[in-house]
Image (cartoon, helix red, strand yellow):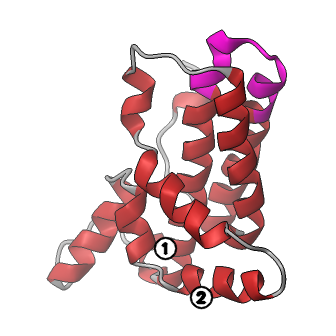
Amino acid sequence: MSKIFEKHRLRPTQLRTVADRRFDDAQFLCDSKKNARANAAMYLGGFVLECLLKAKLMEKYTWLQSVSSPEGRPKDDHKIWSLCYRSHNLDEILERIPEIDNEIERREQKGQTRLLQSLKILCAQWNIYARYSTHSTDCTEARRFVDSIKELRQCLK
């Protein structure tokens, strides 16, 4: 069995490394200009956001990095743990880290506009069910999606 299938808990820095690698993969698929690869590029782009948001979540709630189970913790901690280790709902993860909104708003005041709105749209739009979709997109839409994520990566690192 390949080591890539090993299950282990990642630290925030490792999640960011994974996000960088998957972003490069998404860009490569977009650059191929093959419409047959557009769905995968968009799926990977959303996965990049998931990794970056979960890294932020782990940094805010540092106990997530050392707790293998939420047993014995307050009820709200169970939800936070589940968001980090069981969920792929980017909207719900983002709700737990409002500091990201503040950081992006601060950057927008320095000339980076639309980023917060873009993040919220992407988080609301993307979900893991894209990997099962029988519908197809094209390279133009995938490129727009991945380019939006490219803009946001700096705010989420």
Depth check, front residue: 40 or 3: 40
133 horizontally vs 74: left or right: right
Depth check, front residue: 153 or 105: 105
Depth check, front residue: 77 or 10: 77
Determine the residue positioned at 39% across, 78% down: 96
Whether residue 98 is visible to the viewer of this picture, yes or no, is yes
Residue 97 location, x and y as percent? 47, 79
Is residue 32 in the magenta section?
Answer: yes
Residue 29 location, x and y as percent? 75, 23
Q: Which amino acid does label 1 sit on?
A: Leu
Depth check, front residue: 146 or 113: 113
In this rendering, the count of numbered labels is 2
Q: What residue type is labelled 2?
A: Asn
15 horizontally vs 82: left or right: right
Where 101 sits versus 87, above or below? below
Mark 1 lies on residue? 57
Q: Residue 37 falls in which quadrant of the image?
A: top right
Q: Residue 90 falls in which quadrant of the image?
A: bottom left
Helix, strand or loop under label 1: helix
The residue range painted magenta reads: 27-40
Determine the residue positioned at 18% across, 72% down: 71
Residue 98 location, x and y as percent? 48, 84
Distance from label 1 to label 2 (Cα)? 15 Å
Q: Which mark is nearer the camera, 1 or 2?
A: 2
Is residue 57 in the magenta section?
Answer: no
- Majority SS type along the magenta span: helix
Which quarter of the image is occupied by the N terminus? top right
Mark 2 lies on residue? 102
62 horizontally vs 87: left or right: right
Helix, strand or loop under label 2: helix
Q: Residue 156 falls in which quadrant of the image?
A: bottom right
Where 7 sits versus 100, above or below? above
